């Protein structure tokens, strides 16, 4: 076997040196797909990171009770075979039998009970509380029947259970905890992790014993994911054949790579929304200009969203007027919108008492180019920006302390197709809420906990109308992701910004 | 006795020191090149508003990354446009202001600090010398780029912060060179004579010592100017120097970096200009040293 691989690589080396460039052959031959991540993952344990790369790993290594088909958005049983609402706050699941974790531990009700009780306990510090804090606890009925108890009515429960809530092996997790799980992850998913070198790379191997999951069976034998922060390096490696797939490629580069003709460039919309957050609550100082609604409106009028989408984001991005993505349930679109109108923006600033504009700190953590373009729009109406580019975690911390008057933020909603994943994340007086509107809070509370879809829509609409009417934020655009891969790779990306290794195969 | 035989009269009738200086200067190609390029760039920086064809801050997203004329662009944007559709030539011209401003002010601040310390150490000697030497050693033990990065990261990047940080960090060479020169000069007879006639210390330092070490100072000033310009570019490249939208050459390199594989001119143009400026300043400094003190050639 190894001898065979050796002769083959010798052969490849011979072919390469003889001048016939067939760079990607080596990878297909060794059945290893080389992928690059741009950002380093803080912890592979999916409950203890909040990045997109973490979601990708989570979907490959672990499974949830339920699966949402990314094409049809239909909910299908995954680790559970069926489920029913016993009452408004109790969900009962029948679990799949015969599933084992990568370490051989069998999957049963104990694992579900342990996982739910562990993550729902706030003291354990799950990074994104919103993903888990709607669950109170879980109880075992028998080995393959389990009930999850909710704190309150929570209609998006199924969506969350098909997304960020994945099942962990109870005995192993109790022993190693999040840090151990991060270094030697064990799940039930289509791929098992064989190597974790933080900051460098992760190696995933096909789970030969993967059960009959709606995710499908993995075909690519080995996935080697390396952290390469620089896009140019990623592209150079793609040219040389040492990478097979890169994603989150900036629009300009993707366009050029597409023109080269030897790579497949696939563009897919994502749920990520880019917006300006303004300190309407005056947390960064009561005399903050953004406490004035006219200033916030002026900011909204100052930005040419069409131009940003067409010239910078390109692809399948769209103009966004709401603090949520249009496909999300409850994300009403009949709200106040602000067209590009710099004259009106200047007038509004003058009315607000800033005829000569003002100067403010402007923070951003990603997409420097977009941030600069936005700053330039603001400069044009007289808002002088003191531009500060920070790391995500640093900006988040500053934001939690309420020291950020104006910032360019983005939110991907963890690909949860429900408005609560975004609106309720930021407008319910949490530490990241820069608006603190009591009325919005009340409406969102009703909308989040109602089980009547019509009532939910009604209250989300109310909240969204107030938010846009008061111009609390300046929502701008949705993101898209470019996936670029070699001709050997066969993959159709989905619209939810999740890289699914299980759907990849060799051509 | 003929005139030719008398060495004294020969000296009197030969070219004056000023003439010798001029002859040497015009014969020195490096110095000429340096002076012309630096002079040109100073003029460009001074008259930027007149020379720039467009507003360097005017964004036009529909006109992004237009290639320069020599790569198939139009004369509307001779050097093309950047990633936000801003005219590259205009930004380059305004960028000269930033580079020269930072270079000269940083060299001035550090020159003041370093010269004061160096001259005092060299003239007074003893404990003063020991203290200054200690300070120089402390300063030399700190890597400039690292300290600058840390300070700028804490205080936030802006033109003022970068100028001050560089000014307060780059005085070491001034101090070292001025100390050594002062040590040499202060043992000369004319210094002793001045002391004997009862001249005050400031007077001796300013009128006897300073004029005689000035040529060394000029060389160090040019070196440190080039050094400061490069450091500013490096800091801006790393996102910690001058903040956008201010045009800075280092920042332009950094902004063009992402498109380096496909639009290399975005990096090449500011990079080349930066290279030429630093080269010219260094050549000018070397030339001045050669011209004013021929023995420095060794």
Image (cartoon, rainbow, N blue to C red):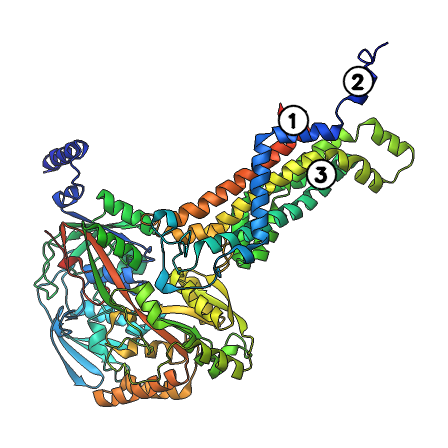
Alpha carbon separation for disc pair 3 and 2: 39 Å
The residue pinned by badge 1 equals B296
Q: Secondary structure at mark 3?
A: helix
The residue pinned by badge 2 equals B10
Q: Earlier in the sequence, mark 2 or mark 1?
A: 2
Q: Chain of mark 1?
A: B
Vertical placement of B79 versus B118: above or below?
below
Residue B125 lies in quadrant: top right
The residue pinned by badge 3 equals B118
Residue A358: image location, x then y, percent:
54, 73
Alpha carbon separation for disc pair 3 and 1: 20 Å
Q: Earlier in the sequence, mark 3 or mark 2?
A: 2
Q: Secondary structure at mark 2?
A: helix
- Do callouts 3 and 1 mark residues in contact (Cβ within 8 Å)? no
Residue at image location 18% in from the left, 68% down from the top: A64
Q: Nearer the viewer, residue A240 or A158?
A: A240
Q: Nearer the viewer, residue A53 or A16?
A: A16
Residue A504: image location, x then y, percent:
14, 56
Q: Nearer the viewer, residue A474 or A147?
A: A474
Q: Chain of mark 2?
A: B
């Amino acid at each position: 076997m190894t001898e065979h691989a050796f002769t083959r690589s010798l052969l490849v080396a011979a072919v390469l040196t003889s001048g016939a460039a067939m760079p990607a052959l080596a990878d297909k031959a060794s059945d290893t797909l080389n992928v690059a991540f741009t950002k380093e993952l803080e912890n592979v344990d999916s409950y203890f990171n909040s990045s997109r790369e973490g979601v990708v790993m989570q979907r490959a290594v672990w499974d949830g009770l339920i699966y949402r088909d990314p094409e049809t958005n239909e909910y299908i049983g995954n680790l559970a075979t069926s489920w029913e609402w016993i009452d408004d706050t109790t969900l009962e699941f029948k679990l799949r039998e015969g599933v084992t974790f990568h370490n051989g531990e069998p999957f049963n009700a104990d694992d579900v009970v342990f996982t739910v009780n562990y993550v729902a306990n706030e003291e354990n510090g799950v990074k994104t509380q919103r993903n888990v804090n709607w669950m109170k606890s879980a109880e075992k009925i028998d080995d393959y029947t389990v009930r999850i108890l909710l704190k309150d009515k929570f209609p998006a429960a199924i969506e969350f259970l098909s997304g960020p809530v994945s099942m962990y092996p109870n005995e192993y997790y109790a022993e190693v905890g999040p840090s151990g799980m991060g270094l030697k992850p064990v799940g039930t998913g289509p791929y098992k992790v064989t190597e974790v070198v933080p900051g460098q790379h992760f190696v995933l191997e096909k789970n030969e014993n993967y059960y009959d999951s709606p995710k499908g069976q993995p075909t690519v034998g080995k996935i080697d994911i390396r952290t390469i922060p620089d896009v140019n390096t990623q592209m150079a490696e793609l040219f040389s054949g040492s990478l097979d797939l890169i994603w989150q490629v900036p629009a300009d580069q993707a366009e050029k790579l597409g023109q080269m003709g030897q790579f497949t460039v696939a563009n897919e919309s994502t749920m990520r929304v880019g917006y300006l957050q303004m300190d309407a609550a005056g947390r960064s100082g009561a005399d903050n200009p953004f406490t004035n609604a006219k200033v916030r409106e002026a900011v909204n009028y100052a930005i040419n969203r069409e131009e940003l989408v067409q010239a910078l984001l390109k692809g399948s991005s769209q103009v966004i007027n709401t603090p949520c993505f249009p496909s999300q349930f409850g994300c009403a679109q009949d709200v106040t919108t602000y067209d590009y109108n710099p004259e009106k923006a200047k007038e509004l600033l003058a009315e607000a008492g800033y005829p000569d504009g003002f100067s403010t700190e402007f923070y951003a953590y990603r997409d420097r180019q977009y941030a600069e373009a936005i700053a330039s729009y603001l400069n044009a109406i007289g808002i002088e920006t003191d531009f500060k580019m920070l790391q995500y975690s640093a900006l988040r911390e500053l934001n939690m302390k309420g020291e950020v008057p104006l910032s360019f933020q983005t939110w991907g909603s963890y690909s949860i197709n429900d408005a609560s994943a975004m609106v309720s994340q930021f407008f319910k007086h949490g530490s990241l809420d820069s608006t603190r509107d009591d009325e919005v809070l009340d409406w969102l509370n009703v909308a989040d906990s109602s089980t009547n879809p019509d009532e939910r829509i009604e209250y989300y609409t109310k909240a969204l109308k107030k938010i846009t009417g008061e111009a609390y934020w300046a929502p701008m655009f949705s993101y898209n992701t470019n996936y670029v891969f070699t001709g050997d790779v066969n993959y159709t990306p989905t619209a939810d910004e999740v890289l699914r290794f299980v759907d990849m195969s060799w051509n | 006795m003929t005139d030719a035989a008398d060495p004294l009269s020969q000296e009197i009738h030969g070219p004056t020191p000023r003439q010798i200086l001029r002859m040497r200067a015009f014969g020195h190609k490096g110095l000429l090149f340096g002076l012309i390029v630096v002079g040109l760039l100073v003029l460009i920086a001074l008259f930027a508003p007149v020379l720039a064809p467009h507003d360097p801050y005017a964004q036009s997203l529909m006109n992004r990354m237009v290639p320069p004329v020599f790569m198939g662009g139009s004369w509307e944007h001779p050097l093309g446009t950047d990633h936000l559709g801003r005219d590259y030539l205009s930004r380059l011209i305004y960028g000269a202001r930033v580079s020269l401003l930072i270079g000269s002010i940083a060299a001035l601040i550090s020159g003041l600090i370093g010269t004061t310390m160096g001259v005092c150490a060299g003239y007074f000697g003893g404990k003063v010398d020991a203290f200054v030497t200690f300070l120089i050693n402390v300063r030399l033990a700190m890597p400039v780029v690292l300290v600058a990065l840390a300070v700028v990261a804490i205080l936030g990047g802006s033109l003022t912060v970068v100028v001050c940080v560089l000014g307060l960090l780059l005085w070491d060479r001034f101090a070292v060179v001025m100390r050594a020169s002062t040590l040499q000069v202060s043992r000369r007879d004319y210094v002793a004579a001045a002391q004997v006639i009862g001249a005050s210390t400031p007077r001796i330092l300013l009128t006897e010592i300073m004029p005689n070490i000035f040529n060394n100072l000029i060389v160090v000033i040019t070196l440190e100017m080039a050094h400061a310009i490069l450091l500013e570019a490096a800091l801006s490249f790393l996102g910690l120097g001058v903040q956008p939208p201010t045009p800075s050459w280092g920042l332009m390199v950094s902004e063009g970096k992402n498109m380096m594989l496909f639009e290399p001119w975005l990096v090449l143009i500011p990079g080349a200009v930066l290279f030429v400026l630093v080269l010219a300043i260094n050549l000018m400094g070397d030339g001045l040293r050669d011209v004013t003190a021929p023995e420095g050639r060794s």
